[in-house]
Image (cartoon, coloured by chain):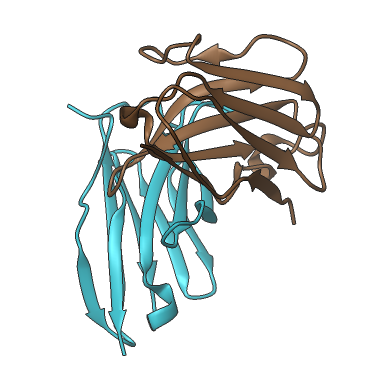
Chain colours: A brown, B cyan
Amino acid sequence: GAVVSQHPSRVICKSGTSVKIECRSLDFQATTMFWYRQFPKQSLMLMATSNEGSKATYEQGVEKDKFLINHASLTLSTLTVTSAHPEDSSFYICSARVSGGPSSYNSPLHFGNGTRLTVT
Amino acid sequence: QKEVEQDPGPLSVPEGAIVSLNCTYSNSAFQYFMWYRQYSRKGPELLMYTYSSGNKEDGRFTAQVDKSSKYISLFIRDSQPSDSATYLCAMSYNQGGKLIFGQGTELSVKP
């Protein structure tokens, strides 16, 4: 089945530094990937939609200069948290949908295993 | 009012019980409905995917959608301790569209 790999699974960084999270579709191509944020015991909140070869689309309230998204190829999207602060500590999850296959009815979102970011 | 409402639980049941998980939503434009299972510190895993109203069965899992009531359910038969996880409902307006998630229900199945 479709596998989404996310790296790193856990990162601890100091306040003011930047952190890059990678999301790869291992056995399929994904023109679109999605980045979510999840707080403990809360739902997934969509941050942005990453489009291969073009600018990402950010949800209302998400700072595009703080959460930089790059989707350079059909199998890789990266999220960089710039100048991280303790309030950015969260669980970040990416997802992707198989592109160019049968109708989307048969191509639901596949999620990575998430990245636990802790900013000290 | 949230677009998708889901009781966060926690819900605790004995092994072998039938589990009923539910979500309600406010926007009748939702057409596609999903249930995801999320183990601790992991990403969500798709369990069921349905379009419009009706039932869908897959092994021990049955998903129901009642669009007239804006209500969806996931039933788990013969629940197992390995079913212990958080279950998230999700829905979208169109194919390939943005998913709106419920808060998730934490389920614990006791041996």
Q: Residue at x 77, y 14 (%)?
A: A53
Q: Residue at x 75, y 25 (%)?
A: A31
Quadrant location, the N terminus of chain B: top left
Q: Residue at x 40, y 27 (%)?
A: A15
The count of marks equals 0
Q: Position of residue A40 (x, y in %)?
A: 30, 47
Q: Where B80 falls versus A33 (above or below)?
A: below
Residue B46 lies in quadrant: bottom right
Residue at far bottom of view: B111
Q: Where B18 falls versus A83 (above or below)?
A: below
Quadrant location, the C terminus of chain B: bottom left
Q: Where A32 falls versus A59 (above or below)?
A: below
Q: Residue at x 57, y 21 (%)?
A: A49
- Quick check: B90 left or right of B5? right
- Quick check: B45 left or right of B33? right
Q: Position of residue B7 (x, y in %)?
A: 20, 51
Q: Nearer the viewer, residue A16 or B52?
A: A16
Residue A76 lies in quadrant: top right
